[in-house]
Amino acid sequence: MTGRWRVRISALAVSLVAASTALVASDAATAAPPHPTAVLAAEYEAAPCVVEIPVERRERVTCGYLTVPERRDDDADPERTLRLPVTVIQTGARDAEDDPVVIPVSRDAGGGMASVVTHVLEDAAWATRDRDVIIVEQRGGVFAEPTLVCDELSLERTIVDGRLATAAERQPQRLAAIQACRDRLTEAGVDPSAYTTAASAADLADLRAAMRLDAWNVAGIGDGSRVALTLLRDHPEGLRTVVLDSVEPPQVDRLTLAPDALTASITALLAQCGADRECGDRYPDLQASLDTVLANAEAAPLEITVKSPVDRAPLVVSLDDEDVMRALRAALADTSIVPVLPFVIDRLAAGDTAAALPVAQRLIDEADAELDGARLSRVCAEELPFTIDETTEETAENAGAALSAHMPTLEALREECAVWEVPAAAAVEAQPVEGTVPTLLLSGADDPIAPPEWAETAANGLSAASAHVFPSLAHAPLWTTDDSCVTFITMQFLADPGADNDTSCPSRMTSTVFLTTADVQPTSALYRLAVDVAEDHRLGQIIVLVLTLGMLFVTFVYGCAYGMRWLARRRGRAPEGAVLSATVAAGFDLAFAGGILWLLSTGDPLVLAFGIPAAAWPLLLLPFAALASTAVLIAVLVRAWRGGDGTFAHRVFLSVSAIATVAFTVWLLARGLLFL
């Protein structure tokens, strides 16, 4: 089936659908033309993949580019085209279905081409069990040509003397950078107003025509769900099913309701911790702890030293209360991080900012998502013009109103949109989508970005919709977790969307198991060690570690051999007691190093990111025992050198061993691994 996708194909116009125009209330915006529906010209050609494909998977993957017009208006310049990368992951089924699953991605929608391809290949075998999966990057994306990624907004430009400017400090610079990016793009002939959701939906329709797909299934993730819904509205031809994971329907005033969604997610976290016996006992007033963290951050920004994503050098990040809320929103959206959030909140309230290091590092590493000019084109045209200026009545009255006081306002976005300067979209882009295509809506119960209520809102206009909420899961449960219930329901739906499928498994899902100080000894030492040695491959750290451990291993072997000879002869040529002390010290240090290596290779990554498993506390005693033995060794050697005890060679070797033990102890102390 996929062989024909490797051939260059042209698709011509098949129909024109009239659309009503509308003016939208906006301070300085003019209504844009109606949504495009005509396919003017599109072609698909094979090309090398834009993301790295593992060697063992390459026989299943083909790639190419879809070329589409930048605009589809009657007076559009036919020479202005875009190239969108496409990755096709083939099914291994012998009797493959001929209706592939197509996923439009962007950094706002599912994390981008690289992460979705990796997930499908490595963690979502169910997706390609019966049919191919086609992943297409939306216009303006990282690998698209042209890309609307604004390098002018890169994190590197806001780092001064190893410190990242705060959000408030960065805003004036950010506005200037947005202007510079827009100027650069327009000078190159790029029209920022052409990068809309409706245009992306038309691109997908072009893809179907170019690949000659009679039937297809479209899956939208997060922001990509708007593309899928718009496709359902504008180009329903051939659509067999639609899967919406964490849907963001156009009629929802997302920008205004975002504080409500985050507040509800935080409230759910606090309630779940209170209902959990261990979490509730350890953190009896988590709300007060969170209030303390926010108040402290508002009074004086929290400072955390992370690794710069630019050069991996130390980078001091200052987080005010709004930054903390942004970080909390990102963490709550990640189901894998939620179990540790009560622990982090409690440690931050106690002044231990290092406890938030793994979360802060992830946010910094993903900060380049803010470079996405395509996101500005969509939000500034399709969402901000339809946003209510005033805070919603629900937000003002709900129990989390105090939390809302720490959340960012829309003022910064308004300033950015004024600079980006794209016209407001037609009113239809903020209206409910209606359709009869079977649609599956999946929501995480604790999603702070797209709460389940939004799925219910989207389903109102879809006559063949089925919505499911999954307890203890957050954003994009289908594509960010390996939960068997989510995949089971999705697989049933794709196999037979009209059947009365078994959808009872959400009621059997277990609640979140929280990580507390009963499970982990708080320290960021193991996390920093793994980053420095395993990820950054810091040569100095590796050399010290290899040399000291190598010498300790030689000492241990030497001591064992010497001991066996001493037992045979009852005499030896080394200073009395020195070999035993050196061997014991080396043994304890090697046992500690081996224990740490075993933890890093077999332990729970979540636990290790925030500390050492509580059950492993005896391991922490080993370097102190080694230090005590080293102290005895040093005393014996001082006496030996003064009195000439033992041979010169033994004294030299044992002295080098003592130096290695001391060096290893100093290394542990510097790494924060020497503690009780």
Image: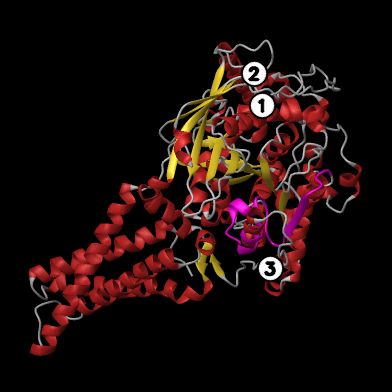
- Check disc 3 and report the residue beneath it: 509
3D distance between C-alphas at marks 3 and 2? 47 Å
* Residue 478 among magenta residues: yes
**Looking at this view, is 356 or 63 the one in front?**
63
Residue appearing at x 67%, y 61% in the figure: 342
Quadrant in the picture for residue 659? bottom left
**Looking at this view, is 247 or 465 the one in front?**
465
Q: Position of residue 60 (x, y in %)?
A: 42, 47
3D distance between C-alphas at marks 2 and 1? 8 Å
Mark 2 or mark 1, which has the lower sequence index?
A: 2
Q: Position of residue 425 (x, y in %)?
A: 77, 24
3D distance between C-alphas at marks 1 and 3? 39 Å
**Label pair 2/1, CB-CB below 8 angstroms:** yes
Q: Is residue 373 above or below residue 649?
A: above
The image's mark for residue 199 is 1
* Residue 33 among magenta residues: no
Amino acid marked by disc 2? Arg
Residue appearing at x 22%, y 64% in the figure: 551
SS for callout 1: helix
From the viewer's perspective, tell me whether residue 63 is left or right of residue 446: left
- Check disc 2 and report the residue beneath it: 71
SS for callout 2: loop
Q: Is residue 72 above or below residue 392?
A: above
From the viewer's perspective, tell me whether residue 637 is left or right of residue 382: left
| Local crowd size for mark 3, using a 10 Å CA cut-off: few (<14), some (14–19), many (≥20) | some
Amino acid marked by disc 1? Ala
Q: Is residue 338 above or below residue 366?
A: below
Mark 3 or mark 2, which has the lower sequence index?
A: 2
Residue 447 visible in rendering = no
